[in-house]
Image (cartoon, rainbow, N blue to C red):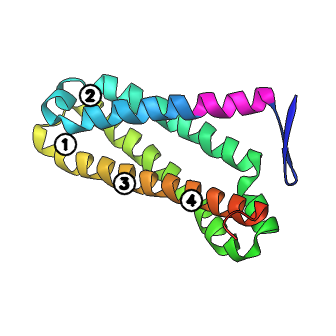
Amino acid sequence: MAITSGIIVLNAAFLQEIKEDDVLLRQLLDQARQRFENRRWLNHSLRDTWRMLEALRDQLATHFTLEEACGYLETSLEEVPELSEQAARLKNEHGPLFQQICDLCEKVAQGVDRRRGPDWLTPLVDEFWCFWNHLRRHEQQEQALIFQAFQQDTGVGD
């Protein structure tokens, strides 16, 4: 079974993979948020936090790959040219966002290896929240772009 929308055709298995990716990404982001909200707990569970961040990093790589493979940004570019600048900007954010989570993983790994004091956590926590807010804003803007492209493509709201 395939779902056709404009020029994109998605088979049911691929659509299921996208849905599963989204669920897993949201679960990992929620776990990360909970860990970074409690600095004391974070300091005592740094090795577990490192493993969880690595899983988040890997899932984010999968997430971005699926988004780009799905082609929704390219569809926005082709079918609704006035959204092309926004779509290109959002697609270009994938690399820097991924680099942010990679840097965070590396810093946590260094903290695990060196067992630094609690003062070391403050910039780490700040860096996490910077990443968190950037990713959240990015995902919201992608959703808004998809909605706009769909509305303009289908003529909704005319």
Q: Secondary structure at mark 3?
A: helix
Secondary structure found at label 1: helix
Q: Residue beneath label 3, please?
A: 133
Given this view, does label 4 or label 1 mark the residue nearer the observer? 4
Q: Earlier in the sequence, mark 1 or mark 2?
A: 2
Residue assigned mark 1 = 121
Identify the residue at horizontal 26%, vertical 32% (top origin): 35
Q: Secondary structure at mark 4?
A: helix
Disc 3 or 1, which lies upstream in sequence?
Answer: 1
- Does 142 lie within the magenta span? no
Q: Is residue 117 left or right of residue 80?
A: left
The residue closer to the viewer here, 157 or 123, is 157
The residue at the point 65 percent across, 74 percent down is: 85
Crowd rating for badge 1 (residues with CA inside 10 Å; few <14, some 14–19, many 20+): some
What's the CA distance linking mark 2 and mark 3? Answer: 22 Å
> Looking at numbered disc 3 in the image, what kind of residue is underneath it?
Asn
3D distance between C-alphas at marks 1 and 2: 10 Å
In the drawing, what numbered circle is on residue 46? 2
2 or 4: mark nearer the eye: 4
How crowded pointer 2 is (Cα within 10 Å; few <14, some 14-19, many 20+) is rated as some
Asked whether residue 121 is in view, the answer is yes
Left or right: residue 74 versus residue 30 is right
Kind of residue at badge 2? Leu
Determine crowd level at label 4: few under 14, some 14-19, many 20+ residues with C-alpha closer than 10 A. Answer: few
Q: Are marks 4 and 1 in contact (CB under 8 Å)?
A: no
Residue linked to disc 4: 144
Relative to 128, is 4 on the left or the right?
Answer: right
Q: Which residues are magenta?
A: 12-21
- Disc 1 residue type (three-letter): Leu
